[in-house]
Image (cartoon, rainbow, N blue to C red):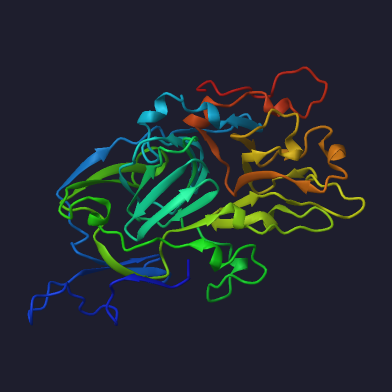
């Protein structure tokens, strides 16, 4: 995110001496400067100043990742995945956002997981790509080496690759912490068409820099009641020969990871709340790109928010039927009554899978029923991918097996393809 920030204690000039306070005329020890940058040295970066050498480890062990295997969507069929059925309410007391994720869908570019959590996560670093974590329900504190965030319902948390962080659910809320995790094999950023050539969000963008929350920091170990020399395990997801080319390692550090006294640059985690997205509307139906909020390599993220709908006197507010020639469309239904999906069984916590090669659109009667409607009170997060997605173990477990027949009004026949045998 090319929006310069400076936090905490940094020297006037980069790559120069920056020391701890000394005693009298004796200079203190040097802080250790770390460049965290994208695309080698050719894109956004930040400089972090550590109390400890950031390369130091005193142990390494294998992290046995949860099941990341995938199964092709074959025979090709649209699907309805009921994410709220993935977790036993009694079991979430022992689940955290990092180790408790269940893979719903994935390909070589992006993985979509879901977690319902009540426990503090381990310290975690994704060494494969950026993460976009959408908070469906509940509240949490997210602590990172850049600082901390208080996050709640509707927040997108954008975490750059290799950022050490952890999730701390708030136990005082009525809803458990529910998160929808989009893990890239690339970086995640605002769409290029929203940005100037220097990275400023432009006037036509549906949000701007004022809507982004930067981390509160610096956040040091003593700020959270820990000790600076506390041995700490950091769980790392990285490239390897596991399912999807992903493996896990646990590094043990001889100190607490919150040792950054200051940082500056244009690369850091940030939070954007979906309620700050300003919908773009028109006299006739607007295509999905007007709803885009972020993008990664070979995928985009859109959100459909409560909005005024088409106001041409002959407008049909729900989408027209369309074939995803180049992409799979994955819609996560968060709130409201999604107008185009009425009668399909879709509800809060549902995910619809509309694969490339299959024409989809409103359920029978939805087009006629939407005529004259002035506002849609719906909230959904959509991921469109440009390579086909496969079903993870979580997706296979909660496929309702009925959705593909929901357009066959009045016909009593089974859904083509049924459910995968693994689910």
Choose between 38 and 273: the one closer to the eye.
Answer: 273
In the displayed structure, 364 sits above or below 238; it is: above
- The image shows residue 239 at horizontal and vertical percentages of 35, 48
Q: Residue furthest front?
A: 172
Camera sees residue 64: yes
In the displayed structure, 211 sits above or below 22; it is: above
421 to the left or right of 12: right
Choose between 385 and 333: the one closer to the eye.
Answer: 333
7 to the left or right of 113: left
Q: Residue furthest right?
A: 313
- The image shows residue 188 at horizontal and vertical percentages of 50, 57
- The image shows residue 126 at horizontal and vertical percentages of 37, 50
Residue 192, image quadrant: bottom right
Residue at the (37%, 44%) spot, across then down: 168
Residue at the (35%, 59%) spot, across then down: 147
Choose between 158 and 230: the one closer to the eye.
Answer: 230
Residue 378, image quadrant: top right
Choose between 30 and 149: the one closer to the eye.
Answer: 149
- The image shows residue 24 at horizontal and vertical percentages of 8, 79
Q: How many marks?
A: 0
Camera sees residue 297: no
In the displayed structure, 64 sits above or below 33; it is: above
């Amino acid at each position: 995110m090319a929006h310069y920030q400076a936090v905490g204690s940094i020297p006037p000039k980069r790559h120069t001496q920056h020391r701890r306070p000394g005693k009298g005329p004796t200079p203190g020890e040097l802080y250790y400067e770390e460049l965290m940058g994208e695309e080698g040295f050719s894109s956004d970066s930040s400089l972090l100043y550590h109390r400890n050498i950031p390369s130091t480890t005193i142990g390494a062990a294998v992290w046995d990742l949860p099941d990341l295997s995938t199964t092709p969507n074959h025979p090709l069929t649209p699907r309805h995945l009921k994410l709220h059925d993935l977790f036993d309410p009694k079991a979430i007391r022992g689940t955290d956002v990092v180790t408790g994720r269940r893979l719903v869908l994935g390909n070589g570019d992006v993985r979509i997981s879901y977690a319902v959590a009540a426990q503090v996560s381990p310290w975690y670093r994704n060494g494969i790509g950026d993460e976009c974590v959408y908070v469906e329900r509940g509240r949490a504190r997210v602590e990172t080496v850049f600082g901390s965030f208080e996050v709640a319902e509707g927040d997108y948390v954008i975490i750059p690759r290799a950022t050490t962080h952890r999730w701390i659910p708030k136990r005082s809320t009525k809803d458990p912490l529910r998160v929808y995790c989009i893990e890239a094999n690339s970086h995640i950023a605002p769409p290029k068409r929203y940005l100037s050539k220097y990275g400023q969000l432009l006037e036509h963008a549906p949000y701007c820099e004022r809507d982004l929350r930067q981390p509160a920091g610096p956040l040091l170990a003593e700020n959270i009641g820990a000790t600076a020399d506390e041995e700490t395990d950091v769980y790392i997801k990285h490239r390897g020969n596991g399912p999807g080319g992903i493996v896990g390692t646990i590094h043990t550090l001889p100190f607490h990871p919150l040792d950054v006294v200051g940082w500056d640059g244009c690369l850091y985690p940030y939070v954007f709340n979906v309620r700050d997205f300003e919908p773009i509307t028109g006299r006739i139906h607007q295509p999905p790109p007007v709803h885009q909020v972020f993008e990664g390599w070979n995928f985009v993220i859109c959100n459909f928010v409560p909005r005024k709908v088409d106001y041409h006197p002959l407008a049909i507010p729900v989408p027209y039927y369309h074939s995803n020639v180049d992409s799979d469309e994955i819609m996560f239904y968060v709130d409201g009554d999604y107008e185009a999906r009425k009668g399909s069984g879709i509800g809060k916590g549902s995910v619809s899978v509309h694969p490339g090669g299959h024409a989809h659109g409103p359920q029978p009667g939805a087009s006629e029923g939407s005529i004259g409607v002035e506002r849609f009170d719906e909230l959904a997060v959509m991921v469109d991918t440009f390579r086909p997605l496969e079903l993870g173990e979580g997706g296979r477990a909660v496929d309702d097996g009925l959705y593909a027949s929901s357009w066959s009004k009045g016909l009593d026949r089974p859904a083509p393809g049924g459910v995968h045998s693994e689910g």
